[in-house]
Amino acid sequence: MSALSSKELPVDLSELEGRKFVCLDECQLCCLCQPELLEKEVPYFKRNFPDRLVVRRSPHKHTALALKNGHGPCSFLDGGRCSVYPNRPHYCRQFPFHVHLSERVQVELDLSCRGVWLDHGEDAQAFGTQLLADNSAALRRGIEDSREVYRVFKANCSEAGIAIEPGKLRREFESKLPLMTDPAFLGSILDRSMEEDEMTLAELPESRILDAKAAEELQLAAMETGLESLAAEDTFSTPVYCDPHGTWKIFVSQDSELDLYEMDREGKISRLRGIVPKRVPLLAPEGEGKKLFTDYLATLNRRDSFLGYAYYLIDDYGYDDSLSNVYYGAMATSALDLLWRSSLLAHIWGGRLDQEGMREGIIFYDMDRLDAPTIGAFM
Ligand code: SF4
Ligand code: SF4
């Protein structure tokens, strides 16, 4: 198969620059993401493991590998090892890389994978280049579909008088990154983004001392954002946090209450304790944690999947809002969600949002970005 030329198919691998990754034996977090099979992979599993396949109808019809007990890790995870390793699906082979298709191809690195934080092992950029080359035919087909979706979206925006200038937004956001470590600034963005007229970040006060009432409101807003992102009908559909010992922790929020569970490698779930969300203080990043936090926001700001998320919201809101209000509002919400979840981990296991505390928060948070709706698609 021929490699992709950037002329026929613009490719962005900048998120991978200078990064390395290694797979950690004790983790197996990605074996919790039910792998979807490519069409060409179905016959092998149908022939050899017909009772380990499930057909899913959402978000589109596809075949996936069965999970243990219907909700735990992949049924092929055996004693901490993949029992079909040489024949594991494409999805498993490419983890922790995600290929997003919009008007171009962009490769993201899943920062929930602990193996990308160790700074040794395989060169991420070389892996990403090979990944694209190995799938060039499917990418060419996929990009045609996503370009058509973008064409329709932009035509709708033009009809509604919504300006689409992502480069300008991204540059403005990048220039204000140092201010984002102050939760009060994030609160200002959030408040302003809900007003009708178009916003810029330059108009916001750079420092704001919150009085007790405003501080409490911000704490509540962050808590509600965090609880909403952890809300689920059951324990099987909320984000999983793989702790530094490789243990899978699950937080489930229901009716403003929060419970912490643990899941073993067989999919058995035990409740560890309840947490009173109002007792979780919203912390601010400190020391080296500030750099990690702003680097992470810079990564989100470069991701086409995040921009596609803002586009999705515009479409969902009926083309009534400006892109800047939606984009900055989504960024501030994500940043507050990340801060609250990081504060939650620090509250339970002790700690601050220093380098270690922020890293754990990002590990807990980043996998959710994959589930966020986006205009475009992950391949
Ligand atoms: S999440 Fe990363 S470290 Fe963990 S099993 Fe998957 S690839 Fe390996
Ligand atoms: S097929 Fe193997 S690598 Fe893929 S999710 Fe299942 S156990 Fe993990």
Image: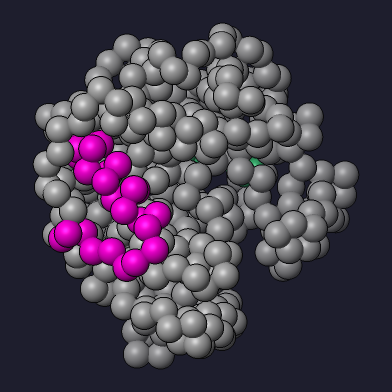
For residue 306, side relative to residue 317 (left or right): left
x%, y% of residue 34?
66, 45
Against 283, residue 195 (above or below) is below
x%, y% of residue 30?
54, 41
In the image, residue 186 lies in the stretch drawn in magenta:
yes
The residue positioned 39% from the left and 34% from the top of the image is: 222
In the image, residue 315 lies in the stretch drawn in magenta:
no
Closest to the observer, 120 or 57: 57
Residue 60 visible in this rendered orientation of the protein: yes
The residue positioned 15% from the left and 33% from the top of the image is: 209
For residue 158, side relative to residue 58 (left or right): left
x%, y% of residue 307?
40, 65
Against 65, residue 340 (above or below) is above
The image quadrant where one finds the C terminus is bottom right
The boundaries of the magenta stretch are 181-203
x%, y% of residue 263?
62, 21
The quadrant in which residue 77 appears is top right
